Image (cartoon, rainbow, N blue to C red):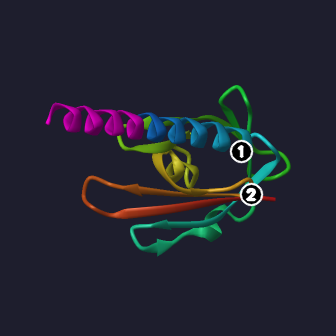
Amino acid sequence: MQKKHMKIIVIALFGFLVLGSCKKQTINQVEKAVIEGEWKVSFFQEDGVNETSDFSAMRFTFKDNGAVEVKVNSTLVYTGSWKVQRDSDHVEFDLNVGEVDPLGELTDDWHIEEHSSTKLELKDESGDGSIDLLTFEKI
């Protein structure tokens, strides 16, 4: 009976190590992808309302030092910060681009739903249960 319990403990520990490793890999993959090139908001939905057009002219450049530059037009550029980190049971993309409208709507700690070298799909569930969705695509 004791061997059976030991086997279960070993399997459980292995599972935790693999899961932790996958999250670390995800963090590194997202960080590497976003610092390469310019990005645009290809989809933004807040409380069920599609507001993508509010961001259509903006270009996002994520720097490897954690800074983000948002080019609104040829003369107006905002700066902020970004970070990818693990938070309990998920990996999140923390974005802070200030409180200026409409950029302030993007400042949040977003759950990473899907990611690739050209696309980052994010989700945020507010305390009231409303869901916001944000997708960045590489230009």
Residue, disc 2:
118
> Which amino acid type is shown beneath numbered disc 2?
Thr
Q: Which mark is residue 52?
A: none
Report the quarter where the N terminus lies.
Answer: top left
Give the main secondary structure of the magenta stretch. helix
Seen at 64% across and 44% down, the residue is 30
Instruction: Please give left or right for residue 85 compared with residue 9 in the image.
Output: right
Q: Is residue 40 above or below residue 50?
A: above
Residue, disc 1:
34
Alpha-carbon neighbours of circle 1 within 10 Å: few (<14), some, or many (≥20)? many
Q: Secondary structure at mark 1?
A: helix
Report the quarter where the C terminus lies.
Answer: bottom right
Alpha-carbon neighbours of circle 2 within 10 Å: few (<14), some, or many (≥20)? some
Quadrant hosting residue 66: top right
> Which amino acid type is shown beneath numbered disc 1?
Val
Membership of 14 in magenta stretch: yes
Q: CA distance from mark 2 to mark 1?
A: 8 Å
Q: Residue furthest top?
A: 65
Instruction: Please give left or right for residue 114 compared with residue 58 in the image.
Output: left
Camera sees residue 114 = yes
Which residue occupies the foreground of this view, 16 or 74?
16
Membership of 66 in magenta stretch: no
Camera sees residue 97 = no
